[in-house]
């Protein structure tokens, strides 16, 4: 669980507009290799009649090495058709206090149905796959 929260923090840290000092390279890909990645499907979901959000991992994406735009990914009983693949390469270590969240050279891919489903807004309606260690194919 701690590793998953750390990976979510890395994704959110890379996406945060206020963290301008973080040196990363961001791009969109059309296909990625997940064979060396522990790809985890995560969700933000509304609970308590919409008064709060539940956020966390649903399951690990199994048996998939290459994912392209338009493919469907499934884990823990949830699935979605991939409409966006964001790639972040860290050009320096990313730290939170004394804890290192990502090392220089690390690559993290985030797959989602669309931009609205990415975990960057606080709207309780996100579903995405976080895939550290992915490799861009195209």
Image (spheres, rainbow, N blue to C red):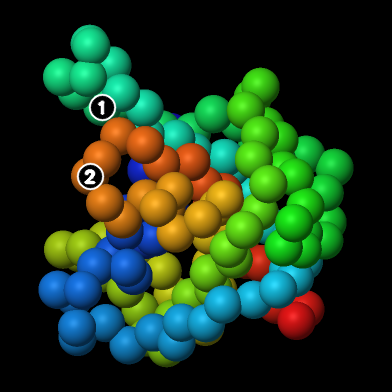
Q: Which mark is residue 53?
A: 1
81 horizontally vs 24: left or right = right
Residue 94 falls in which quadrant of the image?
bottom left
Q: Position of residue 102 (x, y in %)?
A: 41, 69
Which of 88 and 71 lies nearest the eye of the viewer?
71
Dot 2, how many residues are within 10 Å of its Cα: few (below 14), some (14-19), or many (20+)?
A: few
> Residue placed at 82% from the left, 61% from the top?
66
> Residue placed at 62% from the left, 28% from the top?
78
The answer to whether residue 104 of the structure is visible from this angle is no
Which of 99 and 111 lies nearest the eye of the viewer?
111
> Residue placed at 45% from the left, 87% from the top?
25
Residue 123 falls in which quadrant of the image?
top left
Whether the residues at callouts 2 and 1 have beta carbons within 8 Å, the answer is yes
Q: Position of residue 83 (x, y in %)?
A: 62, 58
The answer to whether residue 17 of the structure is visible from this angle is yes
Q: Quadrant of the image for the N terminus?
A: top left
Q: Quadrant of the image for the C terminus?
A: bottom right
Secondary structure of the residue carrying tag 2 is: loop
30 horizontally vs 2: left or right = right
Residue at the disc numbered 2: 122
109 horizontally vs 33: left or right = left
Which of 90 and 130 lies nearest the eye of the viewer?
130
Q: Position of residue 122 (x, y in %)?
A: 23, 44
On screen, 5 above or below 66? above
Secondary structure of the residue carrying tag 1 is: strand
Q: Position of residue 137 (x, y in %)?
A: 77, 78
């Amino acid at each position: 669980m701690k590793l998953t929260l750390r990976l979510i923090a890395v994704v959110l840290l890379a996406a945060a507009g206020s963290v301008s000092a973080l040196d990363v390279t961001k791009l969109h890909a059309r296909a990625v290799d997940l064979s060396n990645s522990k790809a985890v499907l995560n969700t933000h979901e509304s609970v308590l009649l919409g008064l709060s959000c539940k956020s966390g991992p649903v399951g690990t994406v199994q048996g998939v090495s290459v994912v392209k735009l338009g493919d469907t990914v499934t884990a823990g009983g949830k699935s979605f058709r991939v409409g966006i693949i964001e790639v972040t390469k860290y050009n320096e270590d990313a730290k939170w206090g004394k804890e290192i969240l990502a090392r220089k050279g690390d690559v993290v891919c985030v797959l989602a149905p669309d931009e609205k489903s990415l975990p960057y807004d606080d709207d309780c309606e996100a579903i995405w796959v976080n895939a550290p260690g992915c490799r861009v194919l195209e």
